[in-house]
């Protein structure tokens, strides 16, 4: 019989009970408090080295003990954790222990003040440069806008002028206008006569055929 949890040892059924008590693939529960994970007996050491609920001590040797999952939170308050000076980004490139931070600030107060003032002056220069750039962009935008507005206004004036010229085009001569009216009347009368009276289409029908 083959054990089903990964063990490939073949044995008799009568020997199964003794084998289960020592099989490296037998299922066991993690011994760390609050961890309910079940693992193979052969993997217990590997799991223990990465179990989030295992109690560990601070690697900074501050003698604090906590669960592995809380390690990052501990480093945020550990007195022996290396941190950067609050003025690091401004120029004080100093790494110190958290417990020595206050002493460092007191000893370097003057230097930090100088660094702060220099950094503030630099930021003011950058702000003024941005203001100048924004002013130039605003002026350029206003110039472009005025140019577009003048072009549109000129186009509108040309269209209005063209409409006025069309309205002022000379009217047709009196004789042309009379000829036009007579032709219209003639074509209208003839059309009405042809619509209602035409010898060409008068005929009799017999047996469904037209007689010509």
Image (cartoon, helix red, strand yellow):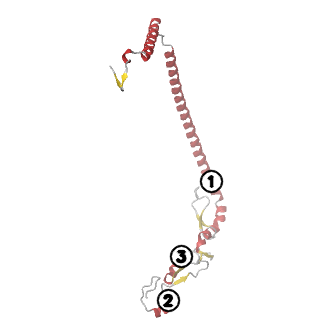
Q: Residue furthest top?
A: 175
Mark 2 vs 3, N-terminal side: 2
> Dot 3 surroundings within 10 Å: few (below 14), some, or many (20 or more)?
few
What is the distance, in whole Å, between disc 2 and disc 3 at their CAs?
Answer: 26 Å
* Residue holding disc 1: 116
Give the position of the N terminus as an image quadrant. bottom left
Mark-to-mark CA distance, 3 and 1: 44 Å
Give the mark nearer the N terminus: 3 vs 1.
3
Give residue 73's quadrant in the image.
Answer: bottom right
Q: Position of residue 161 (x, y in %)?
A: 51, 18
What residue is shown at x 48% (from left), y 88% (from top)? 23
Would you call the spot at circle 1 few (<14 residues within 10 Å), some (14-19), or many (20 or more)? some
Numbered disc in front, either 3 or 1: 3
Q: How far is the residue under mark 1 from the one under mark 2?
A: 70 Å
Q: Quadrant of the C terminus?
A: top left
Residue 2 lies, in percent from the top left, at: 43, 86
For image coordinates 55% across by 76% down, the residue present is: 51
Q: Which mark is residue 20?
A: 2
Q: Which residue is mark 3?
A: 50
Q: Nearer the viewer, residue 171 or 110?
A: 171
């Amino acid at each position: 019989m083959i054990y089903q949890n990964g063990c490939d040892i073949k044995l008799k059924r009568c020997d199964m009970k003794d084998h289960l008590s020592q099989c490296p693939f037998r299922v066991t529960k993690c011994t760390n408090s609050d961890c309910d994970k079940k693992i193979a007996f052969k993997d217990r050491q590997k799991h223990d080295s990465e179990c989030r609920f295992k109690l560990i001590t601070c690697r900074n040797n501050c003698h604090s003990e906590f669960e592995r999952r809380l390690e990052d939170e501990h480093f945020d308050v550990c007195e022996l954790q290396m941190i950067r000076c609050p003025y690091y980004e401004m120029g004080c490139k100093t790494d110190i222990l958290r417990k020595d931070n206050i002493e460092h600030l007191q000893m370097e107060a003057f230097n930090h003040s100088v660094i702060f003032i220099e950094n503030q002056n630099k930021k003011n220069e950058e702000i003024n440069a941005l203001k100048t750039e924004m002013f130039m962009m605003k002026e350029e935008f206003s110039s472009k806008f005025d140019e577009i507005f003048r072009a549109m206004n000129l186009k509108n004036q040309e269209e209005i002028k063209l409409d006025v010229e069309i309205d002022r085009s000379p009217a047709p001569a009196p004789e042309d206008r009379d000829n036009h009216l007579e032709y219209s009347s003639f074509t209208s009368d003839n059309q009405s006569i042809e619509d209602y009276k035409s010898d060409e289409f008068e005929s009799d029908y017999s047996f469904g055929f037209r007689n010509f």
